[in-house]
Amino acid sequence: MSIPGVFYITFLLRDIRTPSWRPWILRKQQFSLPGVPLLQAAGKNSSFNLLGLTEAELKEQFVRGDGPGGQATNKTNNCVVLKHIPSGIVVKCHQTRSVEQNRKIAREILQEKVDLFYRGEDSDVFKEKKASEKKKQEKKRKAKENLERKKHFKEICPRRVRETFVIISIHSFQTNR
């Protein structure tokens, strides 16, 4: 059976026309957890080694939420109050309108708090919080140094020299492009 020349070329090109990103997407979906979106599977808490919680240790209540939202917020019982009975830690979550989402978020928050309560400074949550505080302090220190440098430059150089310096630096920036 012979295939005419035009049909043969289109037959060969049909594999080339498929988008190159399509197989990548299909491969990525294999690594996601069933029922969990791909971005959520790679969330921030995936790297933490937190202590587990059992449902027997938890006491859960649904209460009316408070805050902005008016009547819609005030009349629905979608605020979750979760208590860890052995430690006495209580978490209240009213971040979304969905009870299921609030239950999930409350459990994540409670798990971090319980881990921090039992492990203290050895907790991954504590270590990450300390690292972010250190990074924030370093950023604040650098901003303060930069401000001092600018203030010192203003004191040393008269206004005319500063304007000339700015004009020269702008001119050199434009010529380098």
Image: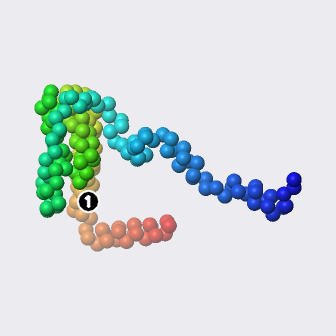
Please tell me how many numbered marks the rendered image carries.
1
Q: Is residue 121 visible?
A: no
Q: How is the image coloured?
A: rainbow
Q: Is mark 1 on a helix, strand or loop?
A: helix
Q: Is 20 positioned to the left or the right of 41 in the image?
A: right
Q: Residues within 10 Å of mark 1 (few under 14, many from 20)?
A: few
Indicate whether 51 appears above or below 158.
above
Residues 124 and 74: in front is 74
Q: Give x and y (percent) for residue 64.
A: 13, 51
Q: Residue at x 24, y 63 (%)?
A: 154
Residue 128 appears in which quarter of the rendering?
Answer: top left
Q: Give x and y (percent) for residue 158.
A: 25, 68
Q: Which residue is drawn at 24% across and 43% down?
A: 103
Q: Is 170 positioned to the left or the right of 134 in the image?
A: right
Q: Can residue 86 be seen in this view?
A: yes
Indicate whether 120 appears above or below 138.
above
Residues 116 and 157: in front is 116
Q: Is 114 positioned to the left or the right of 40 in the image?
A: left
Indicate whether 47 appears above or below 158.
above
Q: Which residue lies furthest to the right in this view?
A: 1
Residues 57 and 157: in front is 57
Q: Residue at x 87, y 55 (%)?
A: 2
Q: Give x and y (percent) for residue 155.
A: 22, 62
Indicate whether 22 appears above or below 49.
below
Residue 107 appears in which quarter of the rendering?
Answer: top left
Q: Give x and y (percent) for residue 15.
A: 69, 53
Residues 54 and 40: in front is 54
Disc 1 residue type (three-letter): Lys
The residue pinned by badge 1 equals 150
